[in-house]
Amino acid sequence: MVTPREAPDHFSFVAGRPRPAAPFVSVLLATDCAAGLFGTLVLPYDELPTGPAGLLVATVLVFNAQAGLYRPTMARGVLADVPALFFRVLIGWCVLATVLAHQSALVHEPDAVPLGVPLVAAGCAVHTLAACAGRGAALWLRRRQAVRRPRPALVVGPAASAARVTAALARRSRGGIRPVGVVVPPAEGAVEAGVPVLRSLEDVQRAVIQNGVQDCLYTHAPESATLVAPAVLEAMGCTLWQLDTRIPGPSAPRGQADELAAFPCHPLTSTPAGGLGLFLKRLLDLAVTVPALLLIAPVLAVCALILRRSDGPGVLFRQERIGLGGQAFTLLKFRTLRPDTAHEAATRWNIADDHRMSRAGHFMRRTSLDELPQLWNVIRGDMSLVGPRPERPYFVSQFSQTHPGYAARHRMPVGLTGLAQVEGLRGDTSIEDRARYDNFYIDHWSLWQDLCILLRTAVCVVRPTGS
């Protein structure tokens, strides 16, 4: 058994595989934003103030995220979401009516048109219809694409249930999912599944790469000692699903009703933050990073000028790192040392005491000023302000083989700082300790914890600890 905290010694990390659900979630967000703005057209205003309109859209998006309306889905249609959509749109319009009434009272406009019940009802109706129409069109196009090009998937579970699900999906050819293998415990006997039977992580990894697997379907509790751990498959870039194969099966949890070939289905995630948590985490990142980047722009300019005069042209250093779910991205830093070769840059662990580093480079690393360009990575969404520190693909592969729990760090967006860093685990320190602190942070994540780590980082950043 490979638990969510373990990585086997033969596991090789698969980097850079994009998650297919992210673009579709962006489409749903854009659709709900457009529906909110379209709904405000019913109001008797020549020009609705930007603030109240933005508040309406933001309120609805937050409540939709809380309800799981942006989570991955399998075969779910838009009609199942209409009650949830309408209720949250109603909350948004009630908030809008309250704000507009308060503004009218403050500016003493006797001729202002109150946003009464008829206008609120009309706005809710138009807003909900627009949201349903947009979502329905997006889901219809997604289903058509899935029928034309079914997504390859692995079925993970005991032999009996895995074979039953595989056969059902084969009969349900228009379901949009094409099983390309079943993952069963090595101790089980012969399995007649009609697809390759995978009994080791090497076989699973090979199947993921060769078939471009996007989804993994668990037919049993992932905590079972006979199954591949979710963290390992997530690290390979797969989206995980839990199927209830009991007969008769209970309904899926309220608000998450979904099905695949009539098996109750819901997404699995080993990130405790969940959809709403990650949404709020992203808002915190932007709320802090954008003003901070504007304020420290002169500091960045001075650092760049000093490095330019000290070490010559090329003040920025770009390097491939591994982020959430194994996706590769280009990390930015101020260049404090010019490696002799690209291989040295990718595989040398620590350069803090390198004699080739200039005085300016030493100062940048001791004060962590060399990390400031990563604020741009945060704005781009490659990183978060707080999370496990990203590492190079070479070391991710090495550490995943030798340190339990290292691969599980990629359940959460990587960060500019993290719990391990404020505890002094920087530079040439224990990788096992870092992985343990990072996983503790992920398992006990909260927005308040992020704020506390940011405050501790502000205190620690001037300490000459190096990195």
Image (tube, rainbow, N blue to C red):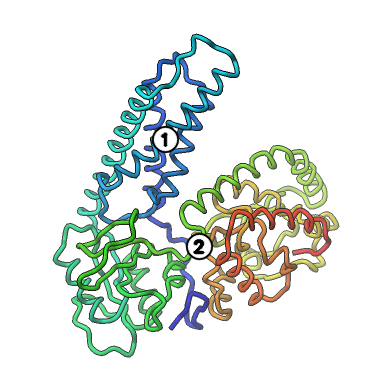
Quarter of the image that includes the C terminus = bottom right
What label sits on residue 215 in the rendered view? none
Q: Is residue 350 left or right of residue 413?
A: right
**Callout 1 amino acid:** Cys
Quarter of the image that includes the N terminus = bottom left
User: Which marked residue is nearer to the observer: mark 1 or mark 2?
Assistant: 2
Residue drawn at point x = 79 percent, y = 56 percent? 459
Residue drawn at point x = 59 percent, y = 43 percent? 286
Residue drawn at point x = 43 percent, y = 75 percent? 229
Q: Is residue 222 above or below residue 120?
A: below
Q: Position of residue 217 (x, y in %)?
A: 31, 68
Residue drawn at point x = 34 percent, y = 27 percent? 121
User: Disc count in the image?
Assistant: 2
Q: Is residue 418 above or below residue 190?
A: above
| Residue nearest the observer in this picture, 315 or 383 | 383
Q: Which residue is mark 2?
A: 272
| Residue nearest the observer in this picture, 443 or 197 | 443
Mark 2 element type? loop
**Callout 2 amino acid:** Pro
Q: Position of residue 150 (x, y in %)?
A: 24, 58
Of mark 1 and mark 2, the one earlier in the sequence is 1
Mark 1 element type? helix
| Residue nearest the observer in this picture, 316 or 188 | 188
Q: Which residue is mark 1?
A: 33
Q: Is residue 335 left or right of residue 13?
A: right
C-alpha span from label 1 to label 2: 27 Å
Q: Is residue 325 above or below residue 25?
A: below
Q: In the rendered image, which quarter is residue 37 located in?
A: top left
Other residues around mark 1 within 10 Å, as few (<14) / some (14–19) / many (≥20): some
Q: Position of residue 114 (x, y in %)?
A: 45, 18
| Residue nearest the observer in this picture, 137 or 235 | 137
